[in-house]
Image (cartoon, rainbow, N blue to C red):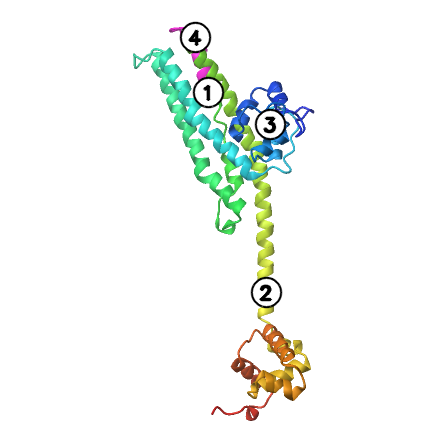
Amino acid sequence: MIQTKRKKYKETDKMRHLIADNSQLLMTLSRFGIPLGFGDSTVEEVCSSHAINVPTFLAVANFMSGYEMDDTNVDAGSLMTYLVNAHDYFLDFQLPMIRRKLIESVDISDPEGLGFLILRFFDEYTLEVRRHMDMENRKVFPYVRTLIEGKDFDNISFKIKDFSQHHESIAPKMKELKDLIIRYYSGRGTDMLNSALFDIITCENDLRMHCEVEDSLFVDVVSRLEALRVTSSIQNICKDEAEENETDSTDAEKIASLSEREKEIIVNIAKGLSNKEIADKLCLSVHTVTTHRRNISSKLDIHSPAGLTIFAIVNGLIPLGEIPRPR
């Protein structure tokens, strides 16, 4: 775990000063999709011009530099994009480049020789890294997208704690490879081999930092997002139950909700009168009768004259004998 220091980068700092302070942040820029050539622009200006979430960039940059980190406003989607781009860098660029240098710098002609064994060690390790990152690409990141979009959260058994409990760093084996080469390989001591060794050391540190960002930042951010989705899910359940309870009101409660005027209108509807006839009989305007009928339908959830007639008979608002027979 990185030991954090008091200093921290701020959105008002010039971006080039961050790079001067920690050259490893060049890779952070790349993984956020930020090109060079930003002159004297501040962190906020550079990030905003490339639609990058500023708190997310600062959280990663401060974490990578061992400074105090504020992850309060980190955007899960932006952080996930950063991690996905890091995976692409390791699998499609850095590890293949190291392999090319190893092939050029160690003797692999003897299947039982140390050079061949070094290359086989590296290939097996690369396969392990690929499986590790493919799992995250296939399972963890789609889950986080589901959280962000708020879709089908209740139907997914996977949770971020499942990832954190089984997540192991993939960097230590790179250190083993480095030590094997330094201690035991006495072949062609070329500049290319030293260059490959330097890249292995750089990759080891890069992978270690990558895993720590996942463990210390990504997991916390996703856990908070999960908590929000759980809260939202509970609220929706309560809302549904409340609506269901409203829908399941008894007839007595529905009758109690009606005004005397609304009961009169229901009785006259049951007698087969039109809105105009009801208006004339009760000395109301047609508009007022229409408004009353709309309110009645809303309270009773009954929208047809036939339905209102049945309701009126069942609940004793009008005797069956006063209902006109069909012609």
Q: Nearer the viewer, residue 206 or 293?
A: 293
Q: Which residues are magenta?
A: 173-191
Q: Residue furthest right?
A: 6
Name the N-terminal-most of marks 2 and 4.
4
Q: Residue at x 48, y 39 (%)?
A: 141
The residue tagged 3 is 61
The residue tagged 1 is 174
**Quarter placement of the N terminus:** top right
x and y percent of residue 279 in the render?
63, 84
The residue tagged 2 is 243
Image quadrant where residue 43 sits: top right
Q: Residue at x 30, y 12 (%)?
A: 109
Residue type at tag 3:
Ala
Please identify, in this view, whether the residue under mark 2 or under mark 1 is nearer the observer.
2
Confirm whether the magenta stretch covers residue 144: no
The residue tagged 4 is 191
Confirm whether the magenta stretch covers residue 175: yes
Name above or below for residue 83 compared with residue 294: above
Element type where label 1 sits in the image: helix
Label 3 vs label 4: CA separation? 32 Å
Q: In this orientation, does residue 316 appear?
A: no
Q: Which mark is residue 284?
A: none
Residue type at tag 4:
Asp
